[in-house]
Image (cartoon, grey):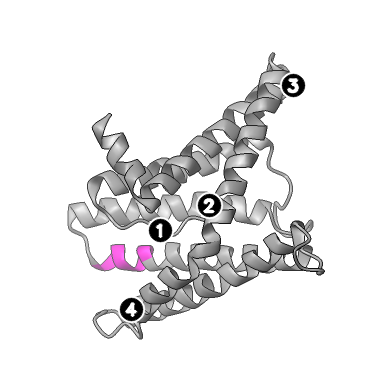
Amino acid sequence: MESVANVLESYRGRDRLVRTVGYSSRLLGGLLTAPGGGHPELGRRLLLVAQELSNCRAVLRLFDDLSMYLYSRGYGLGGTEEDAIVRLLSITGNVADQLYYPCEHLAWAADYRILNIKSDKWWTLSNSLWSLSLALGALRESNNMSRRTYQIRMRVETLNIISCLADLANAVHWMPPGVLWAGRFPEWLVGLMGTVSSVIGLYQMACGSCGTKDP
């Protein structure tokens, strides 16, 4: 219980736990509302919980721009990074992450009619930036893993790749119709992909590892 309380004391820890609960609720709710699930009413309630937790995280991300900027500024042009490819992937990923937040803020404000603009294009743009960041993250980890073969680092980078690819699968699902498998995932599969990446994030935090960014 103390370890859980310690996680909840930090913003990142609380966000990861809320994310895990939200996607787990979506996974279970999707299974219960699927044909033959047997408990559609309970499933709908769990999906409602998942949506509200997702909305909660979106509101909290309104305050993430500065921390992302400080992270990007700290990395800079990656002068301490030995590998040029990893450096390029990291810089590009940081730019995508930095642009993601204002795009999502605009989409959120449009949905709540704070701004008189259409939210669709801003959600699409923010989701595209997130997808780009995840793809670059998977490539970066793969490139690192091919050069650093010692066991602990390989395990960390393998988990990062799995997390990035799980989130990327969902990111593509939320793209406009016609883009690869956009819109084709059932609720339970979205929940499964998100739960996998969320559990990895919690594990990495417990082990003191640096995980990937997880909108």
Q: What distance separates the C-alpha of mark 1 from that of mark 4?
A: 15 Å
Nearer to the camera, 148 or 103: 103
Residue at 60% x, 50% y: name it.
170
**Mark 1 touches mark 2? (CB < 8 Å):** yes
Question: In the displayed structure, does residue 56 sit left or right of residue 36?
Answer: left
Residue highlighted by disc 3: 35
Q: What distance separates the C-alpha of mark 1 from that of mark 2?
A: 10 Å
Q: Position of residue 206 (x, y in %)?
A: 27, 44
Asked if residue 146 lies in the magenta stretch, the reply is yes
Residue highlighted by disc 1: 212
* Placement of 160 over or under 118, stated as above or below: above
* Placement of 72 over or under 119, stated as above or below: below
Task: State the extent of the magenta-drawn residues as a range.
Answer: 141-147
Q: Position of residue 10 (x, y in %)?
A: 34, 50
Label annotation for residue 75: 4
Q: What distance separates the C-alpha of mark 3 from that of mark 1?
A: 35 Å
The disc, 3 or 1, on the residue closer to the chain's N-terminal end is 3
Which marked residue is nearer to the observer: mark 4 or mark 2? 4
Mark 4: amino acid: Tyr
Q: Name which quarter of the figure residue 128 lies in.
A: bottom right
* Placement of 141 over or under 152, stated as above or below: below
Residue at 68% x, 60% y: name it.
108
The disc, 1 or 4, on the residue closer to the chain's N-terminal end is 4
Question: In the displayed structure, does residue 185 sit left or right of residue 98?
Answer: right
Mark 2 residue crowding within 10 angstroms, few (<14) / some (14–19) / many (20+): many
Tell me if I can see residue 190 in this picture.
no
- Say which element carries label 1: loop
Q: Position of residue 38 (x, y in %)?
A: 69, 13
